[in-house]
Amino acid sequence: MARGRKINSNGERSKQLLLEKAMELFSMKGYHETKISDIVKAANVTQPTFYLYFESKDSLYNDLNRRFLYEFDQIMNKSSEQVEKGFAGFIRALEQKITLLFIYIIENPTLTKIGFLESTQSHLVKSQLSEHFLHLINLHDCMHILQSYRVDSLIMVDSFVGSLERLIVTHLFEQKKQPVDLAKDVIHLYFLRDYSGNT
């Protein structure tokens, strides 16, 4: 926390307003083009008020990244009480996770742009997403699905995550598809095909 007074409810509102306006500006102008003076002007607070809550623009940006990572982890770590082994259970669990992720993204587009697409830490989020999907595959005893593609499982999962990233930009942000429909489409593309080895 930056220097200054104890945060009360008014102070917390000021901090949240600074974060919200910063998110909007970072999303529109980018991190480097956004100045602290732009943020305080948009939030209609003074520059000293900014420094009550944040040491710098970096610390505010890091706060936003931490928030995205926390909320992302909440979605990815949410699990059913009972694991249904096998392919059908895997597909249901994967569809549920991707749908929840897509809904979150639709509801938080500016934070997603920062945390998932633009920040220097975004590659770590995508690596975590790959790890979550590999965990899900192993949890449901479905590694044979990836092996049927005759490619390295990490390449398959990273390709899947790369497709999600592209579809978030081209279909979710552009509102061409609803989260549930897009989740079904991407799962069908990658996993609901002939596994007999025919191409």
Image (cartoon, helix red, strand yellow):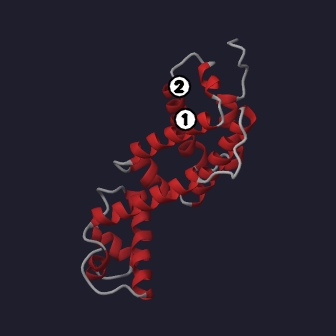
To which quarter of the image does residue 150 belong? Answer: top right
Residue at 59%, 56% in the rendered image: 104
Task: Give the tally of numbered discs.
Answer: 2
Residue 134, numbered circle: 1
Q: Position of residue 59 (x, y in %)?
A: 30, 65
Q: Residue at point 63% right, 55% down?
A: 103
Horizontally, is 157 left or right of 187 in the view? left
Q: Is residue 76 left or right of residue 2?
A: right
Front one among 113 and 175: 113
Residue holding disc 2: 153
The quarter of the picture where residue 184 lies is top right
Can residue 182 be seen here? Answer: no
Circles 2 and 1, Cβ within 8 Å, touching? The answer is yes
- SS for tag 2? helix
| Dot 1 amino acid type | Leu
Looking at the image, the residue that sits furthest to the top is: 198
Residue nearest the viewer, comparing 97 with 111: 97
Report how far apart the C-alphas of labels 2 and 1 lie in the structure: 8 Å
Give the residue type that dot 2 points to.
Ser
